Image: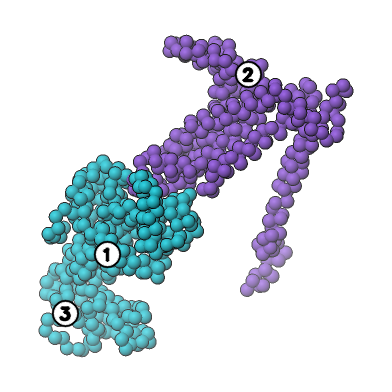
Chain colours: A purple, B cyan
Amino acid sequence: MTATLSARTVGSPAGLSRRLSTYLYRRPTLALVLLLTPPLLYLGVIYLGSLAALLVQSFFSLDGFTGQVVRKLTLATYRDLLTRANLDIIMRTTVMAAVVTVTAAILAFPVSFYMARYAAPRTKAFLYLAVLLPLWSSYLVRVYSWKLILAKEGILNWSVTRLGLEDALQWLLGLPGIGGPSLSVSLLGMFLVYVYVWLPYMILPIEAALERVPESYLEASGDLGARPQQTFRRVILPLVFPGVVAGSIFTFSLTLGDFIVPYALGNSALFIGQAVLAHQGTAGNIPLAAAFTVVPMLIMAVYLAAAKRLGAFDAL
Amino acid sequence: MPECSSTRSVPAVRFDGVSRYFGDVRAVDNVSLDIFDGEFFSLLGPSGSGKTTCLRLIAGFDQPTSGTIRLHGQDVAGLPPYERDVNTVFQDYALFPHMTVGGNIAYGLMIKKVPGPERVARVAEILDLVRMSGMAARKPAQLSGGQRQRVALARALVNHPRVLLLDEPLGALDLKLRQQMQIELKAIQEQIGITFIYVTHDQEEALTMSDRLAVFNHGRVEQVGAPADVYEHPSTDFVAGFVGVSNVVTGEAARAITGSPQSFTVRPEKIVLRDAGAAVADGWCTALGRISEVIYLGAHTRFQVELEVGGALVVTQQNVETTSMDVQAAQGRRVRLVWQRSHNRPVLTGTS
């Protein structure tokens, strides 16, 4: 029957595509190879290639007299990287990334929980849109809007003054290290903007993880005597933790690599992204810029290893 | 609704005019029910009949719209699940995937801060009871459906609840395993002597295991009684049809057979097939009809007989000497049905 059928359709385009489908259906390995070749070529050559180039560059050095890159493997650049000033930059950036991540997780959890467990389908669709909408507009525009909001003449300052909380704000801005002349030129302001711009990247994975926890687990926990906070700690948190880690990978690494927010809202205290920009651009010290870029990758590797040790991926 | 007379004092669970509405839907509609201590009690009914909602009201996952529920005499209105002395075996088992079997079972004990050594001992003891010894270190994902079911049972029982709620716990198992678990569940219940409240849509399961059962339909209780009682004396045509095969004779057909228009039901296995010309003894009912369908079921055969006075009756007959060939040959034959008048059960009609 198959024979007569294919004999009848041979030659027509439909017959050809059907025969091709059948041919590939019966050779799943070949189909997989055909599907994966383009992305693997792209990732292998462009992605891994540039990463390898970056790594190699970081082991070159800059000749101090000529300003030329010496293409000879050396650890000299890493020695330069580990100066007091550069370590300060790395430390400052890492602490900022950590604080932003923790704050984003704390803010994202209730929103995600509401979206996953309580919101009616329409409300949920609206919330998805509300979370994603800011990502549709330019990141640069949003950062500069925040600069206006946070400025001394901005709406936040105005509101705070109207509420009579000016002294509290002045006290905050007076804190050494994180303060500054106004919120728009301070680490505090940067922190606020970072939390704002990265929050969607935390909400979405946590929400997805919460969706995968069936209602009956929570009921079972309550049934076995656990109060809601115990259920949260013993059942919800362990099951959703991979989602929190996934979100924190975004917020943490995005903060580590960002240079626009510190450029717009920062003061003289540099962040890793700015240092990379400065070294590879104006200073022309590509090896040091590359070495700086390796730092966030190492931090992320350490972070993921720690998360794995803590059992973050056990429930996967 | 018939109240069961009992000398036992305080019922384990008492429903008093309990209703639960979801918007316009009356999921549970004015249910009054007593379930006694140590009973294996089944809530039987088709899906959407309110039996699971009743279970959730007892567990505390849901609150009644009106009426009161008492657990061992205590009104539990507004009491959350974690403050009720009941435990539940969930339909999907709801085992925590991030914990081992031992961790799952010890969960309730850990929450209640039972000391470590006692916890270990009780987990081992309960694993033994459900015949899962040595499996404590496994993860739920490594277990078969039947094993998960046992762990879910152990996780509930280890807390020594006074009432155990089971929500169609055998629904996901295959027939053989289900029948085996039915016997085991009943044995465990008799061994530990606590109240089991068992939700099922499977009438055979309910008849096999229960001390008593309640038949639910459209959020109401149609009948409460012992399995034999409900099977032999169904009080409504719905119960007659849901528990066993519906064999309800109504109106003119009923008058022609019994002389009264009162609807009645008769169980298929009580009816005997005779030749159309056979004589009928005193005290027996009879009806002439034609066999319209023959279903050979191995151990017995089911005949659908269209009655000449109207309506149809199902007759089952053990295949003591007959073979598949013999019963198929009966198709279309004119027969006389006879059964003892005492097997007629008057029923209320129009409830289904």
Q: Residues within 10 Å of mark 2 (few under 14, many from 20)?
A: many
Q: Label 2 belongs to which residue?
A: A266
Q: Which mark is residue B109?
A: none
Q: Name the image quarter holding the N terminus of chain A.
A: bottom right
What residue lies at 74% left-to-right and 42% top-to-bottom?
Answer: A48
Q: Amino acid at mark 3?
A: Gln
Q: Label 1 belongs to which residue?
A: B190
Q: Which mark is residue B340?
A: 3
- To which chain does the residue with label 2 belong? A
Q: Are marks 3 and 2 in contact (CB under 8 Å)?
A: no
Precedes in sequence: disc 1 or disc 3:
1
What residue lies at 51% left-to-right and 41% top-to-bottom?
Answer: A241
- To which chain does the residue with label 3 belong? B
> Residue B297's x, y, as percent?
36, 78
Q: Work out how far the residue at label 1 is from the one at label 3, CA to CA, in angstroms.
A: 37 Å
> Outermost residue, front direction?
B117
Q: Amino acid at mark 1?
A: Glu
> Residue A238's x, y, as percent?
48, 43
Say whether residue B44 is visible: no
- To which chain does the residue with label 1 belong? B
B249 in relation to A230, above or below: below
Q: Residues within 10 Å of mark 1 (few under 14, many from 20)?
A: some
Q: Amino acid at mark 2?
A: Gly
Closer to us: mark 3 or mark 2? Answer: 2
Closer to us: mark 2 or mark 1? Answer: 1
SS label for mark 1: helix
Q: Residues within 10 Å of mark 3 (few under 14, many from 20)?
A: some
> Residue A303's x, y, as percent?
61, 37
B133 in relation to A55, above or below: below
